[in-house]
Image (tube, rainbow, N blue to C red):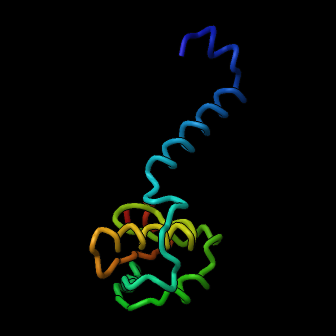
Amino acid sequence: MAGAEHKKLGKKGSQDSIAAYFKEMEELLKPLSEKSTKAKDELTISLEVIDAESGKVRPCSLDEAKSWDWEYYHTMRIINDRQVKSFDHLIDVLCHKESKGYKEVILYEFPRFMFLSGG
């Protein structure tokens, strides 16, 4: 960005443009975002959860996943190197995986500090 344009935008303008950029990138990266063709009751794919702290693997129902506190930012959930941030996002990912022929999806769950510190 040219110096004059940068000065014209100021701090607030540059923050808005950065936020807009990341929002646009997030939309591009979402698989089937808000376009899920199946309801959660129609999914046949199974979900396995790996607790990164203990290493325990367990099956997980969608009803259980729906009951998780998705707003609690200290817990991170990852499927194939992508953070899953809400139950609706989880359903989108599962629909996408099922449409590609997957029978099972593995979700890693861990405290945020483990991921951010290289755990």
From the top left corner, tell me how far across and down residue 44 is, in percent. 38, 85
Residue 1 visible within the image: yes
**Vertical side of 59 occupied by 84: above or below:** above
Q: Is residue 39 left or right of residue 45?
A: right
Say which residue appears at 42% left-offset and 71% top-offset: 95
Across the whole image, how many numbered discs are drawn on residues? Answer: 0
**Vertical side of 1 occupied by 25: above or below:** below
Q: Is residue 59 left or right of residue 41?
A: left
Residue closest to the eye, 56 or 48: 48
From the top left corner, tell me how far across and down residue 29 is, in percent. 43, 51
Q: Quadrant of the C terminus?
A: bottom left
Residue closest to the eye, 80 or 30: 30
| Residue 108 picture quarter | bottom left
**Vertical side of 98 occupied by 35: above or below:** above
Question: Which residue is most to the front?
Answer: 37
**Vertical side of 23 occupied by 1: above or below:** above
Q: Is residue 39 left or right of residue 97?
A: right
| Residue 109 picture quarter | bottom left
Residue 48 visible within the image: no
Question: Which residue is most to the left?
Answer: 101
Q: Is residue 19 left or right of residue 55?
A: right
| Residue 67 picture quarter | bottom right
From the top left corner, tell me how far across and down residue 55 is, in percent. 34, 84
Say which residue appears at 53% left-offset and 83% top-offset: 65
Say which residue appears at 39% left-offset and 83% top-offset: 47
Say which residue appears at 43% left-offset and 68% top-offset: 93
Residue closest to the eye, 119 or 103: 103
